[in-house]
Image: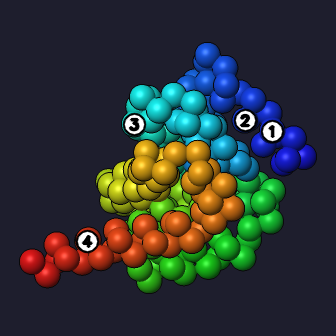
């Protein structure tokens, strides 16, 4: 089922209205949809290289807005909707682990996990359920989501089509490298 959905999304990326579809997927992935918007973002950026940064910004912004929906589901509607999403993805263990990490590390956990390919919906719903301060949630989500999608855009900008397979197959490794860079940068500001 996911493979056919993946194929369908890749076909949508070639349409004239692809930016709207990508926005919808990016929004939905942050709260309930199973596939990340990278499925559309990468081919769209490769097809129209002059719109790479525009597409990346739209994708990150839509993800941020979708994250607010996920946060609201965790904060206001966890018992009726949030739990159903967690159960649908069979992510009860991850949800419990994320609660513990939020309690221990707070916003840093959101930033660190938000740049990885871990389903962002689990983070947003958990952050809402844990009642993480909304302003802190938004600021951390901006750092995490824009970093995540800019990482992809930078790779596409410099390496083009040859990096597409690496992004699709080794996204966790790429995200980990970015994570080290982001954390190193944040720590360097702290000690300056």
Task: Report the residue marked by disc 2.
Answer: 10
Rounded to the nearest whole Å, what is the CA distance between mark 2 and mark 1? 5 Å
Q: Residue furthest right?
A: 1
Quadrant of the rendered structure where residue 33 is?
top right
Task: Report the residue marked by disc 4.
Answer: 186
In contact (CB < 8 Å): disc 2 and disc 1:
yes
Q: Secondary structure at mark 3?
A: helix
Q: Residue furthest left?
A: 192
Rounded to the nearest whole Å, what is the CA distance between mark 2 and mark 4? 35 Å
Q: Earlier in the sequence, mark 4 or mark 3?
A: 3
Q: Horizontal and vertical percent for residue 115?
A: 48, 62
Task: Report the residue marked by disc 3.
Answer: 53
Per the rendering, the mark at residue 7 is: 1
Q: Earlier in the sequence, mark 3 or mark 2?
A: 2
Quadrant of the rendered structure where residue 134 is?
bottom left
User: In screen coordinates, is 102 left or right of 3?
Assistant: left
Q: Secondary structure at mark 4?
A: helix
Q: Earlier in the sequence, mark 1 or mark 3?
A: 1
């Amino acid at each position: 089922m996911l493979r056919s959905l993946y194929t369908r999304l890749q076909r949508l990326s070639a349409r004239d209205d692809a930016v709207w579809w990508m926005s919808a997927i990016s929004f939905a992935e942050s709260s309930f949809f199973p596939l990340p918007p990278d499925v559309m973002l990468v081919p769209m950026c490769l097809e129209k290289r002059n719109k790479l940064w525009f597409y990346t910004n739209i994708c990150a912004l839509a993800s941020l807005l979708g994250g607010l929906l996920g946060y609201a589901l965790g904060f206001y509607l966890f018992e009726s909707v949030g739990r159903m999403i967690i159960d649908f993805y069979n992510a009860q263990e991850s949800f419990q682990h994320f609660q513990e990490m939020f309690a221990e590390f707070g916003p840093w956990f959101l930033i660190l996990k938000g740049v990885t390919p871990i389903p962002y919906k689990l983070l947003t719903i958990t952050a809402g359920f844990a009642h993480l301060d909304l302003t802190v949630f938004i600021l951390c989500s901006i750092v995490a989501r824009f970093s995540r999608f800019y990482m992809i855009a930078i790779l596409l900008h410099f390496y083009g089509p040859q990096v597409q397979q690496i992004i699709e197959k080794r996204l966790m490794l790429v995200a980990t490298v970015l994570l080290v860079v982001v954390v190193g940068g944040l720590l360097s500001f702290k000690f300056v």
